[in-house]
Image (tube, rainbow, N blue to C red):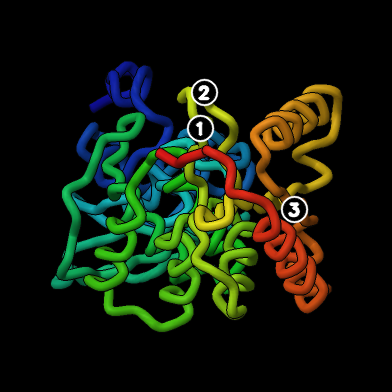
Amino acid sequence: MRRGDWARHPLITTGSPVISAKQLETLGMARSTISRRCGPGGTWRILLPGVVLLENGEPTDEHKIEAGLLHAGEGSILTGVRALARYGLRNLPGTEEVHVLVPAERSVADCAFVHIERSRRLPKPRERVGVPTAPVPRAVIDACRRTPDLDMVTAMMAEAVQRGFCLPQALADELDEARRGSSLRDALLPILGGARSVAEADAWNLWQRSDLPECRWNVRIFDANGTFIAKPDGWCDELAFAWEIDSLGYHAGDVGFRDTLARNARYAAAGIVVLQTLPSRLRSEPGKVVAELRAALDSARLRPRPDVRLR
């Protein structure tokens, strides 16, 4: 095929700029032409062995994902951090890695920015912007397995649940299937218990280590008339006591400050005892925080329990 013919082919003119060398050869392009165009000063570049970018600039994240899937072969599935980003999750570690699942029997190796994982448990992929992507529970656990920062592990798990991408039990089931270590199970326990952030996970762990009454997490509280009062981070229903983990960043600014004052006014009007704690103190001053919790709970015991209920 002459240059004028392959240059007008839709794969070149309208397709993705990421293409395999084999595809180019199928169009009639000589290997020497491919090598010359991808060489120093050329108009194209090699992304991975046998994978060409029909541009000579820096590849984008999308280019790398397409290249990784081409390198991995047919039936490969994007997972991990890059998969979660396609679903719209935000609390993600920075990484250059493209994590790809392939059938266990496939012979393909890691290369450059691509991490290949052979799996006998390939999930049914979901199309996300044209890319076969692992379901959220699998992608979360795969991302967590390759993330050494346990706070980030908790943040990914918590966001996936808090924003409704999956249920806590789905993460537990995936973790059981993966048969992974205790550190991920420890990180998941607060999420199963109702925590929905790293700070709430710290609070959940602190409460569990203390001899305090039963606490529920992120439940909705209503007054006797059925009017919504608040959704406290922690709630001791026995004593109608609310625990709020209030960060300066989240509650700063006119809107955040106004909403916090309005929430506290509703607590006061309903007769609910509330304690507010900065997230940083859960780690820097755990003993003092527990002492403050005990004092607040004692105060709640001294008054009749108000007629409030959770749903």
Crowd class of label 2 (few under 14; some 14 to 19; many from 20; radius 10 Å): few
The residue drawn where x is 19% and y is 55% is: 123
Q: Give the amino acid at mark 2.
A: Thr
Q: Quadrant of the N terminus?
A: top left
Going from N to C along the chain, the mark reached first, 2 or 1, is: 1
Which residue is more in the foreground, 104 or 229?
Answer: 229
Q: Quadrant of residue 48?
A: bottom left
| Residue 59 appears anywhere in the view | no
Which residue is more in the foreground, 294 or 72?
Answer: 294
x and y percent of residue 135 in the render?
28, 48
Q: Give the amino acid at mark 1.
A: Phe
Disc 1 secondary structure class: strand
Q: Quadrant of the C terminus?
A: top left
Q: Are marks 2 and 1 in contact (CB under 8 Å)?
A: yes
Residue identifier under label 1: 222
Going from N to C along the chain, the mark reached first, 1 or 3, is: 1
Disc 3 secondary structure class: strand
